[in-house]
Amino acid sequence: MTAASMAPDAGGGALLLAGDRSGRAGAWRLPDLTPIAPMRHLAPEALRSLLASPAVGGLVAGTHSGLLRLETPHGVVTRSAHRRNVTCALETGELIISGGEDGLVNAFQSAQLDAPPVTIDVGAPISDHHDAKTGKAHFPFAPT
């Protein structure tokens, strides 16, 4: 497994999203790990971040080479978002935000992933594994 994320389930529970080095991803209902979406091919390379996007009703996957792929029932948008790994992705209602090993943070309009993002260069790789202030490991985007 090279990417994992949790998302709320429509039934009030939680889902586990997981991706692998072959570019495949699947979804399981927690806590019993009941499969709800079989592993399927999303990208031609390793997935590094996954996000279920309620705003667009789809899945956002970040890849090893910096691609960001949005897959919805209406189609697929793939764009170059980073020069290296997309290490994390989150949604803030109308924005999809991605961070990468290239030190960039990109903010895309959820409805317009193909439009240019607002980009901030923070000067250091973005990681979802450690709190930049404390250095402590934590689950991505979980309250500390």
Image (cartoon, rainbow, N blue to C red):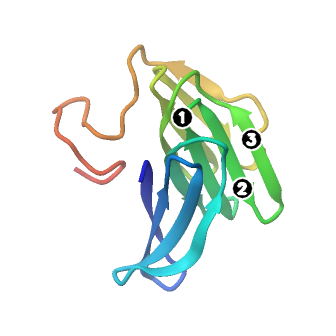
Q: Name the element at disc 1.
A: loop
Given residues 93 and 126, the one toward you in this image is 126
- On screen, residue 124 versus residue 138, left or right, reads right
Determine the secondary structure under disc 3: strand
Tell me the quadrant of the picture where the N terminus can be found.
bottom left
- The three-letter amino acid code for the residue at tag 3 is Thr
CA separation in Å, label 1 and label 3? 14 Å
Q: Position of residue 25 (x, y in %)?
A: 56, 60
Please name the residue shown 47% across and 71% down the image.
8
Closer mark to the observer between disc 1 and disc 2:
1
Residue 71 is labelled as 2
Which residue shows up at 59% across the image and 23% down it? 119
Within-10-Å neighbours for mark 3: few <14, some 14–19, many 20+ = some
**Residue that carries the numbered disc 1 in the rendered image:** 64
Query: At label 1, which amino acid type do we have?
Result: His
The numbered disc on residue 78 is 3
Q: Is residue 138 left or right of residue 21?
A: left
Q: Element at badge 2? A: strand
Residue 100: where, in percent of width, then height? 48, 29
Q: Mark 3 or mark 1, which is nearer the start of the sequence?
A: 1
Q: Is residue 13 above or below residue 67?
A: below
Viewer-proximal residue, 14 or 107? 14
